[in-house]
Image: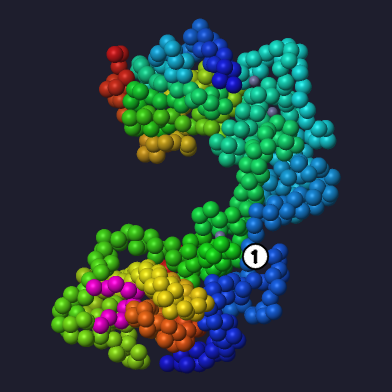
Amino acid sequence: MAAGGHKRIVKELSEVTGDPPAGTKVRLVDESDVHIWEILMDGPEQSPYSGGHFKLLLTLPKEYPFKPPVLNFQTKIYHPNVSNDDKGSMCLGMLRSDEWKPPNKLSAVLNYARNLLIEPNPDDAVEGGIAEQYKSDRRGFEKTAKEWVKKYAGKS
Amino acid sequence: MDSEDEVISVASSEEMMEDQDSDLSMGGDYSDVDLDVDDPDVGFETQDKDIKPKRRPYEVEFNIYGPADIQSHQDQQIDEVSAILGQPPEATAILLRHTRWNKERLIEIYMDKQDTLLEEAGLGKSLAKLPELKKVKGFVCEICCEDGPDLKTFSMKCGHRFCLDCYRQYLAQKIQEEGEAARIKCPGDGCNKIVDSKSLDLLVTEDLKDRYQVLLTRTYVDDKENLKWCPAPNCEYAVDCRVKQRDLNKTVPTVHCTCGHHFCFGCTLNDHQPAPCSLVKKWLKKCEDDSETANWISANTKECPKCHSTIEKNGGCNHMTCRKCKHEFCWMCMGVWSEHGTSWYNCNRFEEKSGSEARDAQAKSRQSLERYLHYYNRYANHEQSAKLDKDIYLKTEKKMTQLQSSSGMSWIEVQFLDAASQALQQCRQTLKWTYAFAYYLARNNLTEIFEDNQKDLELAVENLSEMFEKPTDQLSGLKVEMMDKTAYCTRRRIILLSDTAENLKNGGAHSLRLRPGSFD
Ligand SMILES: [Zn+2]
Ligand SMILES: [Zn+2]
Ligand SMILES: [Zn+2]
Ligand SMILES: [Zn+2]
Ligand SMILES: [Zn+2]
Ligand SMILES: [Zn+2]
């Protein structure tokens, strides 16, 4: 089935590079490996991440599409659903193996991630402290998020 | 002190056990003896036993089931409910799992709102048609993007059709990698239909079917409140026990698995009678939090209280004799050993200082630390001693086996050592938990009875433990004495556990009381 998986990945890749979701750019890190995608995502305008440019890595496991892709923020981001460590992992909703369904598409994953930047999900947070602040002190949250954008997500 | 009465009232039930105890001293496996007692006369695996002694106050009724039993239990219930609902067995199985094997509730909901139930359980309507593989014109698999007129495809009633290879790989991923079985959904995006066993049979390979069954059985046991897996590594038995969660303050349900492991059905930790689960949890937490404070205790050497020469502890026994000055003392309290048997000496009880001494905050906190250390010390020491007892037994057994081959003593004759060792292990386990328990007890006359029982058991245990430190060549001559001491230990343990269990069960004003805040 590896060949089948390959066919699917190549098809998705050409679709996404041909018509990328709003505010994102996609390319392979290494042209010979279709399993590692580099994503450049602009912070959505209606979010505190507006003006930021985020680099993400989308890794497809060898069992893809039976296992979900893995999404990591390489640019530091202040967000309840992104782990504040060197991995920057986002792992919730459709990115979790018990919710992922094989027909799900990577373009949907990118849209999902971008929507989370607009509307975080504090009830399924990986950073409890940030989630708490998001719920109780939205202005404080936005302030820090914007500071981090300036500090880490400027044009490089 | 009216402890006499208490002990006597239990002594009558203890007499019944005389037979068993002598049975044990004849070289029977102690854990087996205990197990037989627990075998209830009703249940799945009824064993032929001539004697069916009444359960003791600290014993609970339970059954042990192997994988085949668990499987047939499920099948029985599925057949039964399938007949009532008029649904095929594979759909009934899904419905039963959906309601966590609550038959009554399932039937009730089914009668009440069938459609909603079928929908929620992931079944949908019209279940009679058998699942089948199809070739479909113009089909493109949404998962692998393959197409072609010869592609075999499958879909459940929901109509989400994928190629056979993808469907298979999806199921393999769920079953093998993610350990899912009872709640595998259709691969279709957003679809919640559960893959039933008929469809599964059609799709997966034999080895996956086996794994699937194992996983189904696992969820069955996990779903049933009265079933729990034996926590021993690689043990495949499950225990059926009807003790309710809410009764765990009043009873400590120790069960004995066929594999030999004794554990608490309430919390699945190792047997911790007589202390109730919630106190055990609290105690373990406290020990963890205070591990810094209590670190010094596990030291293996101390000074002789008389001549100050260094004494090393090799065996489990806490009755120490200084090699140099022959002074006999207690490893726990460092007090003179000869006083330990007397009624006025308290090694096990913590004497709270009263009056002006403990008035200011600092003195209070020092006293509370002392109190904790008193109990922790003894708790940890019995744990440690049990290990040392075991080490020394293993060494002794080895020597005895050598001795046997040279002296012609038969194998059966050294079994008394094994029985003694097992009794020691069990009694020290109990003693260990009496100290955790006592830490939370408020002081009243029942506490004193408890402590008297504790003291008696402790002394019995140290006396037996001491015998293991005798030179090996003397041991065969000590057989009768050792058997007596083993039986005595066992009896003291039964008395302590029975008394405590009855007190816990009765509750109310005349029971053992916990210090304020112990149960929250
Ligand atoms: Zn396919
Ligand atoms: Zn479906
Ligand atoms: Zn077991
Ligand atoms: Zn327990
Ligand atoms: Zn000495
Ligand atoms: Zn002592």
- For the residue pair A120 and B325, the one nearer the viewer reads as B325
Indicate the position of residue B41 as horizontal and vertical percent values.
70, 73
- For the residue pair B75 and B18, the one nearer the viewer reads as B18
The answer to whether residue B315 of the structure is visible from this angle is yes
Is B26 placed above or below B120 here?
Answer: below
Indicate the position of residue A69 as horizontal and vertical percent values.
49, 25
Q: Is residue B515 left or right of residue A143?
A: right
Q: Quadrant of the N terminus of chain B?
A: bottom left
Query: For ligand 2, which image quadrant applies?
Result: top right
Query: What residue does disc 1 label?
Result: B63
Indicate the amino acid at tag 1.
Asn
Q: Residue A141: which quarter of the image?
A: top left
The answer to whether residue B449 of the structure is visible from this angle is no
- For the residue pair B399 and B9, the one nearer the viewer reads as B399
Indicate the position of residue B315 as horizontal and vertical percent values.
32, 74
Indicate the position of residue B484 as horizontal and vertical percent values.
47, 87
Q: Quadrant of the C terminus of chain B?
A: bottom left
Q: Residue B335: which quarter of the image?
A: bottom left
Task: Give the secondary structure at mark 1.
Answer: strand
The range drawn in magenta is B312-321
Identity of the residue drawn at 67% across and 39% down? B209
Identity of the residue drawn at 74% across and 12% down? B149
The answer to whether the beta carbon of the residue marked 1 is less than 8 Å from any atom of ligand 3 is no
Identity of the residue drawn at 37% across and 21% down? A49
Q: Is residue B410 magenta?
A: no
Is A24 placed above or below B448 here?
Answer: above
Q: Is residue B313 magenta?
A: yes
* Magenta: main secondary structure: loop
Q: Residue furthest top?
A: A18
* Chain name for mark 1: B
